[in-house]
Amino acid sequence: MTALISPSILNCDFTHLADEMDKISSADYAHIDIMDNHFVPNLALGAPIAEAAIKASLVPCDAHLMIEQPDRWAPVYAEMGFASVTFHAEAAMAPVKLARELRAMKVRASLALRPGTPIEPYIDLLGEFDQILVMTVEPGFGGQSFLDLTLPKITRTRKAIEDAGLDVWIQVDGGVSRETIERAAAAGANNFVAGSAVFKAEDAYAEITELRRLASAHM
Ligand code: DX5
Ligand code: ZN
């Protein structure tokens, strides 16, 4: 299995958005964080920037909605042109209904869990999703340290997916770098969001290649 690398543009240079999107053309997805200042204590990337990023991106875009009322807003992002839409379990009223709605729009449906949210209540629902995002930091900001305490949840999620014979991706997001990506891969993740690691690197292309190599060796 080859690891998927999804750079987060949260802390890229927005004065040169198209150039920043070009830098990650060897990635698998471009990860776009949407924050409403209610679900998380930060406000980021409204619809005009999200649309510009999709337009400038050479790879499919993945929306990470850190917002309240995703039941209402996630379909709007699907309509916008995202290939994958992630909404949070803690915010969704009807996650199965919403995932079905997204899939009907031919968009990958992804369920995110904050570090303190267990996977267990969602085990029987796994087949409704294309991906589970296990947050490896508290959502809201880039540049935080990877929380190792989330690793057992990744392992349990991978086991539950395998036991059910499903093809559900596990994405990790937060503090993913050359130092941490191997642990996340060994635990069972296959899709790796990396913000600072990619955009602070001298050479984003080389960083993406190295992250993919390190993770793939453990999958
Ligand atoms: C944080 C966002 C992340 C963030 C990751 O809540 O969801 O996608 O950009 O940034 P790094 O890789 O720097 O931790
Ligand atoms: Zn994110």
Image: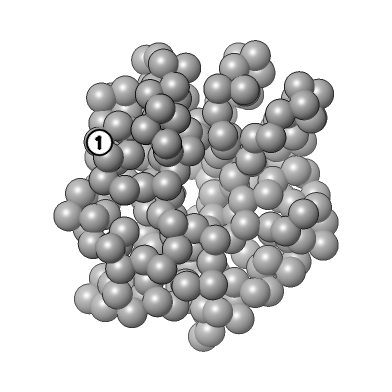
Q: Is residue 143 visible?
A: no
Please report the residue visible at 33 percent of the width from the left and 79 percent of the height from the top.
19
Residue 38 percent location from the top left of the image: 26, 33
Q: Position of residue 161 (x, y in %)?
A: 73, 28
Q: Nearer the viewer, residue 175 or 161?
A: 161
Residue 170 horizontal/vertical position (percent)? 64, 41
Q: Nearer the viewer, residue 131 or 10?
A: 131
Who's the residue at 71% across and 29% down the image? 166
Q: Is residue 158 left or right of residue 88?
A: right
Q: Quadrant of residue 192?
A: bottom right
Left or right, 127 with reference to 203: right
147 relative to 112 in the view: left or right:
right
Q: Residue at x 31, y 48 (%)?
A: 81
Compared with 50, 187 (above or below) is above
**Any part of residue 107 in sight:** yes
Residue at horizontal 69 percent and vertical 35 percent from the top: 167
Determine whether 126 is above or below 41 in the image.
above
Indicate whether 79 appears above or below 163. below
Q: Secondary structure at mark 1?
A: helix
The residue carrying mark 1 is: 76
What is the three-letter code of the residue carrying label 1?
Val
121 shown above or below 183: above
